[in-house]
Each structure stands twice: as structure tokens, then as C-alpha cells.
Amino acid sequence: MKSVSLIDGRGLKTPRVVEIIGPAGAGKTTLCQALNHYPKQIRLYDFPDVRKIVYAPFFVWYGVSLVPTLMRLYQRKSRQLTRREFAWLTILNGWPSVLLNEVKNCNQVIILDQGPIYLLAEMREFGPGYLKSQEAEKLWQNLYCRWAKTLDLIIWLDTTDEYLVDRIRGRAQDHVMKDEPPATVSEFLVCYRRMYDLVLSTLMANTFGLRVLRFDTGKQPTDEIVNHLLIEFGHDDKSHDWK
């Protein structure tokens, strides 16, 4: 079942579950902070945290259900899943049901920062070898189908490598590419763009309703992007009323 949608004043379906993606330095955190000023209309939502006891039932239930499939796929020549990777697969497996229940119980647009597309890209690219085998495709297809039915809109932030390199180096928090030469950072950025392209193309092959909005954060200021999204979400920024 696709996530429930409202109808805005333009007669268009209002997206209910939205993910923000983009390479490092693209402005995802900045945009989320700006959208957080509209709590009545927008809800920022993080994936279940394996370190919090409140989510223990979630990880037990959806993690255990994955074990038979993973045991069948596992090959001794391949490395095992790390704990983090197992948690990510559990999130990919169970989070769609949680989000669809959330949509039923609130009128807000749910915004995901580094959500399923990020996790799918990471796992497909850097996960153990046995998850890249032909035998594992049924598992991935199942996960893609679940998320194709859950996500309504993807906000893809990006800009030129030159801007991104400057932002990565200039921000306070550490990053694996912070002290690397520009050529190495560019290779890193190309890799993530390719990963996102692959995941998105597979998701969109499983649904007709998923849309992608792209913004160049080197040319478009955050407030302009926010205003565009508020209209997309059926919210008139001038009146601050939900449409």
C-alpha cells in the first residue's frame, strides 16, 4: 500500500514521506534545520537507533526475520556482516511499516535525512560480497519494492565539486575526505552520485509515483529551496496555513 497522500490547493498529491539525499557538503543538514522551523507541517524523522532500548522490539522482530535469508546467502569466502550493517538491513526491512503507520496518524510531511536511499546505496556498494551475488537479488528486490511503496518524493541536493570540496574542508565536524586532495574528493563524490543514481533508477522501476526534485545548492539559496518545498508540500508560506 502506497503512503497516504493529501490533495493540495493545486489538485496535486502532497508527498507524505520524503528523503533528502546528496553528496557530502551538499547542504542536507542546513536544509533540514531550515525545514524544522515548520513543525506543524513538517516532521524530521530519524531511523530507529539500535543503541536505544525503546527500539529493541523493532530490531528483534525485523532482525530475526532476516536471519534465515542471510544464513542461506552467506558464503564462507565472504566477510560477515558487521553489527552496523545488520542494523541497517533490519532498518531497511522494517522501517517502511513504521513510516506508513506514522503517516496514518499525522498530517505532517515526514522528512528523512540519510534514510533508505543512503542505506541501500551504502549496503549495495560496501556490503559483504555475498550480498552482491545473483542469489541475493530477491532480497534486494523485496527491499526496493517496500521502499518504492513508501517514499513519495526525493530531494536531491548537489552542486559542483569545487563548492563541495570547500564546504567539506570548511565545516567544523570531521569527515573522511576533509584533508584529502581535491582529486580524491572528486572521486569520492562521483562514487556516491553513481550509487544514488543506481538506487533511484531501481526504485523508480518499481513504482510510477516516486518523484525526484533536484536543487543546485551552489546557485539556489536555502530559503529559496524551502519556499519551493513548502509549495510542493501544499503549504502557503505567506499565510502559514496548511492547504
Image (spheres, grey):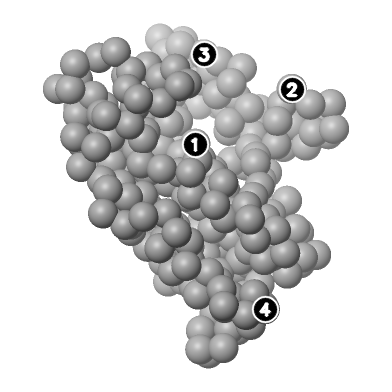
Q: Which is more toward the observer, 188 or 74?
A: 188
Where is residue 68, by image quadrant? top right
Q: Which residue is mark 2?
A: 51
Residue type of the residue flagged with mark 4: Asp
Query: Quadrant location of residue 2?
Result: bottom right
**Residue drawn at the location 84% of the way across and 26% of the way down:** 53
Q: In percent of the image, x 17 and y 22: which residue is there?
A: 182
Q: Earlier in the sequence, mark 1 or mark 2?
A: 2
In this view of the protein, which residue sits in the foreground, 169 or 134? Answer: 169
Q: How many numbered marks are there?
A: 4
Circle 4 Cα neighbour tier, 10 Å, few/some/many (<14 / 14–19 / ≥20): few
How far is disc 1 from disc 2 in space, using C-alphas? 17 Å
Residue denoted by label 1: 119
Q: Which residue shows up at 23% across the image and 24% down it?
A: 185
Disc nearest the viewer among 2 and 4: 4
Image x and y of residue 153, in percent: 48, 63
Q: Measure the alpha-carbon separation of dots 3 and 4.
A: 51 Å
- Mark 4 — residue? 241
Which amino acid type is shown beneath numbered disc 1? Answer: Leu
The percent coordinates of residue 6 (x first, y second) are 64, 79
